[in-house]
Amino acid sequence: MARLSFLSALLLVGFTSALGVRHRQDGYRDGYGYGSQDGGRNCVNFTIPVSISARQGVFPDIPAKANLEVTDFAQKFVQQGRNYTATILLGYQTVEGNYDISAQYCYPDKVGSTIQILTHGIGFDKTYWDLSFDDYEYSYTNVALKYGYSTLAIDRLGIGNSSHGDPINEIQAPLELEALNAVTTKLRKGEIPEIKDEYKKVIHVGHSFGSVLSYWLSALYPDNTDGLALTGWSANGSFIGQTVAGWNLHSARLNQPFRFGDASNGAIKLLIESFLGLGRQDLVESVVNAIKTYTGNTPQSYEVWNDIQTTEVGDIINEWNTTATRLNYSPGYITHSDLTSNQFVFLRYGNYDIGLGVVSENTKQPVTIGELLSLGGEPAQSSFKGPVIVFTGQYDQPFCGLDCYATGTAAASIPAEAKKNFPKGGVFEAYIQPDTGHGINVHFNSSAGNAAAYSRVLDTTPDFILVFAREYALGWNTCTR
Ligand SMILES: *[C@@H]1O[C@H](CO)[C@@H](O)[C@H](O)[C@H]1NC(C)=O
Ligand SMILES: *[C@@H]1O[C@H](CO)[C@@H](O)[C@H](O)[C@H]1NC(C)=O
Ligand SMILES: *[C@@H]1O[C@H](CO)[C@@H](O)[C@H](O)[C@H]1NC(C)=O
Ligand SMILES: *[C@@H]1O[C@H](CO)[C@@H](O)[C@H](O)[C@H]1NC(C)=O
Ligand SMILES: *[C@@H]1O[C@H](CO)[C@@H](O)[C@H](O)[C@H]1NC(C)=O
Ligand SMILES: *[C@@H]1O[C@H](CO)[C@@H](O)[C@H](O)[C@H]1NC(C)=O
């Protein structure tokens, strides 16, 4: 495994993909990854307007401007022996509105009959499915394209380039579910003008909270999906306290002031400028130079690494002095504090490229207080009759408590216990990927040459599972490092 040198870590600060794209009339192609070697890669970005409404909880104002207030919320949320949502719930209301959902549509040169709607989890945006790191070697999208699938990856409502909203009483799971359902319906009816191809089947592929929403959609609107691939998921909600504690949640605006916030820029800018002087492009380098200047010693790269990139200092200087989009999240959008808390929940140490870990920290997305309060509101069962595959990393924290095999029952794994959630379901498969944490796509072994384990599935199940299995099982990011 290639550990990043300090220099490479330096280069990753503020890293955004500089890979070129060649434009053509209806999208763009790029020259990287499987897609171009095989069936082609054509992608186009656009927003999908949706008019939606959802009945969801009304909560009091929860102070979250300051980091210590966010900690107070986290303590109350994880307090043992009670359901904090129920404790503070004031009632229910119908929230309705018009929103924009940011989407990336990708299709192979020869368009097939099935499209996958990709819904990311907490901490990520739609780029989770198309990581550009190492020339797109970790791109799920490219492998889907390779096998003839089209993909529509969305930023969940409230996150990334989709419409933001009130983080307590608006951006909650039920409204996000309605947005996902509305996108699905528009796609099926041919009402997304940028998508000219017609598809016979629409598969919902989720990761983590995106899997919760995909599952939820199958329960409320079972006719609107043809298959579920729920990655980084189980039906066991017991580990969420561990997750919220491990995240060490901070206000997003304060955590990455240049990328997430703006009000705090002034103070942080002054601080950085007074310490480092103007004109420095690279703050990590600046800190190294400052240490040299003030102490006369050159710091060891591991010291710099540990003090900056694995701590919140790395987050605070992220996107400093660049032209990055200011996401301008309001208070109530909160985020895990740094790469260490990122690893705690999402990553298995030794099984991911630290450089990609840094990228995932620098490009992370927040979670809203309303999302946390509405997690767990999904129906206990889904009447969906179609095929379901669950694909979860062996050391998944949020859905397995760091060990998917520790069931304490006869069940093969914690994700396997979700079969009971689909009493009318067709084919159900739960697969545990070895040496992988929750953020599956970020790991070396996000796929691994595991065709054998799926041969039975390949023989007996509908088309989509076949290809889903292939995507994860063949060739994609196999563990050669
Ligand atoms: C489309 O959006 C993705 C992020 O999802 C970005 O990496 C890519 O550069 C965008 N492409 C174009 C042509 O704007
Ligand atoms: C907590 O309470 C909320 C609101 O009453 C409810 O929707 C949710 O299902 C409860 N969660 C658990 C785990 O019991
Ligand atoms: C959001 O939009 C910005 C500006 O157009 C773009 O640089 C970025 O890649 C987009 N991100 C996502 C996740 O779509
Ligand atoms: C930001 O970058 C510009 C352009 O490279 C440079 O002129 C300016 O001095 C930098 N400002 C700071 C505060 O680093
Ligand atoms: C969740 O998993 C743990 C550990 O296997 C188990 O003790 C617990 O009963 C499970 N809870 C539910 C609701 O299935
Ligand atoms: C990767 O996963 C495969 C199964 O897909 C497993 O056989 C192998 O042991 C794992 N290897 C590593 C190095 O994680």
Image (cartoon, rainbow, N blue to C red):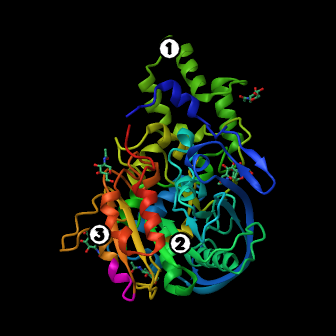
**Residue drawn at point x = 46 percent, y = 85 percent:** 384
For label 1, the SS is helix
Q: Position of residue 117 (x, y in %)?
A: 58, 68
Which kind of residue does numbered mark 2 sit on? His
Nearer the camera: disc 1 or disc 3 = 3
| Label annotation for residue 414 | 3
- In the rendered image, residue 98 lying in the magenta stretch gets the answer no
Q: Is 273 in front, or is 33?
A: 33
- In the rendered image, residue 423 lying in the magenta stretch gets the answer yes
Nearer the camera: disc 1 or disc 2 = 2
Label 3 beta carbon within 8 A of ligand 5: yes
Q: Position of residue 193 (x, y in %)?
A: 78, 70
For label 3, the SS is loop
Label 1 beta carbon within 8 A of ligand 4: no
| Label annotation for residue 204 | 2
Label 3 vs 2, first from the N-terminus: 2
Q: Where, quadrant-wise, is the N terminus in this rendering?
A: top left
Tell me if mark 3 has few (under 14), some (14-19) or many (20+) residues whose alpha carbon lies within 10 angstroms of its own: many
Label 1 vs 3, first from the N-terminus: 1
Label 1 vs 2, first from the N-terminus: 2
State how far apart marks 3 and 2 are (Cα). Answer: 21 Å
Q: Position of residue 452 (x, y in %)?
A: 31, 59
Q: Is residue 375 visible?
A: no
**Residue drawn at point x = 56 percent, y = 14 percent:** 293
Nearer the camera: disc 3 or disc 2 = 2
- The part of the chain drawn in magenta is 419-424
Which kind of residue does numbered mark 1 sit on? Thr
Q: Is 287 in front, or is 379?
A: 379
| Label annotation for residue 295 | 1
State how far apart marks 1 and 3 are (Cα). Answer: 53 Å
- Say above or below: 252 vs 324: below
